[in-house]
Image (cartoon, rainbow, N blue to C red):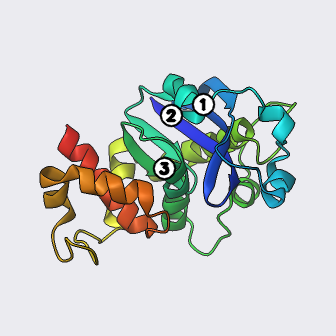
Amino acid sequence: MLRVIDTETCGLQGGIVEVASVDVVDGQIVNPMSDLVCPDRPISRQAMAIHRISEAMVVGKPPIEQAITRYHGSRYYVAHNASFDRRVLPEMHGEWICTMKLSRALWPGLKYSNQALREHLRLQVTPPRDLHAHRALYDCYVTAALLIRIMETSGWDAGQMLARIQQTSSIDTFPFGKYRGRKIADVAQRDPGYLHWMLKNIPDLKPELRDAMQRQLAKAAD
């Protein structure tokens, strides 16, 4: 089972207002879930214009730390531009697969937004009628359809997709800080708290470095 997850936020720096997921099982999209979330900051006008989630819609809703618990339990999480969703969500115990990175590998030279790929690849997908693009559950359906097409085109299973993504990231040592030049895998074993501190307190980490740190922390916890 692959759990496709998506978030809508207050802006590029985070503050979740909606989380949703669908599962992909044997090539079928099943088990849709979605929750509006009370964010930890105001919703920016730019974000509100995109997802159309207002302050009034999230008043009294649970915080993300409470809402996210029912999304736990998958070995694999899938997202389009997964580094963003991993950054804004609380820690999820599982491996992450990015459909944007896989699409770049399979179909070079395209535009890689969800909607652009949906149109170019003519994905057959039926999101909920009462939603629209940039609502989390709607986008989950599109990402799930994209994931199914990726698997059909490539023949890759979850492990092979994960390996392909990890090959694209050559970062295995710290480029700065007190562990500069040290292997990230070694630090994850010896001082995991430092990695968790960096992930929480340095929002502008390069996605490749963030992915490498989260991957090594997951391995160290096994």
Determine whether, in the image, residue 97 is placed left or right of residue 107.
Answer: left
Q: Position of residue 181 (x, y in %)?
A: 18, 77
Q: Which residue position is annotated with label 3?
A: 86
Quarter of image, res 32: top right
Residue neighbourhood size for the residue with mark 1, other residues' Cα within 10 Å, grouped as few (<14), some (14–19), many (≥20): many
Q: Earlier in the sequence, mark 3 or mark 1?
A: 1
> Which quarter of the rendering shows the N terminus?
top left
Q: Element at badge 1?
A: strand
Q: Is residue 109 above or below residue 114?
A: below
Q: Is residue 194 above or below residue 53?
A: below
Residue neighbourhood size for the residue with mark 2, other residues' Cα within 10 Å, grouped as few (<14), some (14–19), many (≥20): many
Q: Which residue position is annotated with label 2?
A: 3
Q: Position of residue 49 (x, y in %)?
A: 86, 55
- How far apart, in angstroms, are the residues tagged by discs 3 and 1? 17 Å
Q: Amino acid at mark 1?
A: Val
Q: Position of residue 31 (x, y in %)?
A: 60, 21
Q: Amino acid at mark 2?
A: Arg
Determine whether, in the image, residue 160 is placed left or right of residue 207.
Answer: left
Q: Earlier in the sequence, mark 2 or mark 1?
A: 2
Q: Is residue 164 visible?
A: no
Q: Which residue position is annotated with label 1?
A: 22
Residue that appears at 52% across and 32% down? 65
